[in-house]
Amino acid sequence: MAKLKSPHRPATPEDAHALAELLNMAGDGMPEYLWEGMAEPGQTAWDVGRYRASNKEKGFYRNATVREEDGRVVAALIGYPLQRDPEPVDYVSMPSMFVPLQQLEELVPGTWYVNVLATYPEHRGKGYGQTLLDIATDKARTTGRSGLSLIVSDSNTGARRLYERYGFSEIATKPMVKENWENAGQNWVLLAMDI
């Protein structure tokens, strides 16, 4: 992969707060809902989110690229290559909210999966999403992947427009399992593109 150039850089554990916020934006509030259920007494959902972002061993910062302006993270990409031959999934023990997402992910093995692409609202419309998708495409090529994939809520029309302009097409949909999570969407939509 080509070296990232300023204002883009690999995320660090110190970016945990921004990464948690951007993950929650991209996930339409689902991450915060899940973090609330994980919080120990005295912890907030955001404490959990920041910990999950910054954990030195398993933190999702390791798969993140951020864009900075004036020393502040304003956008992020989190993604990784999916296995070409994934192991069978135990859906019985999987939380029900994740089942449709996992089922969709299984339809695009061997792609580079865009787990999160988000920009703070005050920085939208500046082309940052497009640039981060260019970085994702570069990462996909470097890891020997022939395509990109992602999952978006059917209610997130702005993001979907960006993805379709970039070249993504709808592959499949699955109904959301919401439990008590409040969201305007009804379906998860799998989008993918060849590179």
Image (cartoon, rainbow, N blue to C red):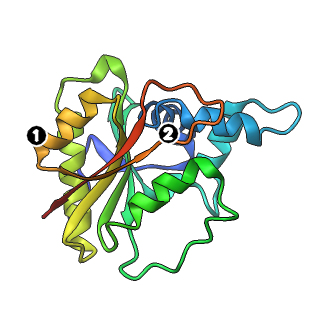
The amino acid at mark 1 is: Arg
Q: Earlier in the sequence, mark 1 or mark 2?
A: 2
Residue toward you, 170 or 195: 170
Residue 150: x and y in percent read 32, 52
Pointer 1 with pointer 2, Cβ within 8 A: no
- Amino acid type of the residue that numbered disc 2 sits on in the rendered structure: Leu
Q: Is residue 98 visible?
A: yes
Residue 3 appears anywhere in the view: no
Foreground: 68 or 189?
189
Mark 2 lies on a secondary structure that is helix
Q: Residue 63's x, y, as percent?
A: 44, 58
Q: Which picture quadrant has residue 39? A: top right
Which numbered tag is attached to residue 165? 1
Q: Which mark is residue 99?
A: none
Residue at image position (57%, 38%) is 31
State the residue at coordinates (54%, 56%).
99
Give the quarter of the image for residue 55: bottom right
Dot 2, crowdedness within 10 Å: few (<14), some or many (≥20)? many
> How far apart are the alpha carbons under marks 1 and 2?
25 Å
With 160 as the anchor, is 76 left or right in this view?
right
Disc number lying in front (1 or 2): 1
Q: Residue at horizontal 40%, vertical 82%?
A: 85
Where in the figure is residue 8, as x and y percent of width and height?
A: 29, 45
Instruction: From the image, tell me which residue sits under label 2.
Output: 19
Which quarter of the rendering shows the C terminus? bottom left
On screen, residue 157 versus residue 63, left or right, reads left
- Residue at left 48%, top 53%? 100
- Give the mark count: 2
Q: Quadrant of residue 116?
A: top left
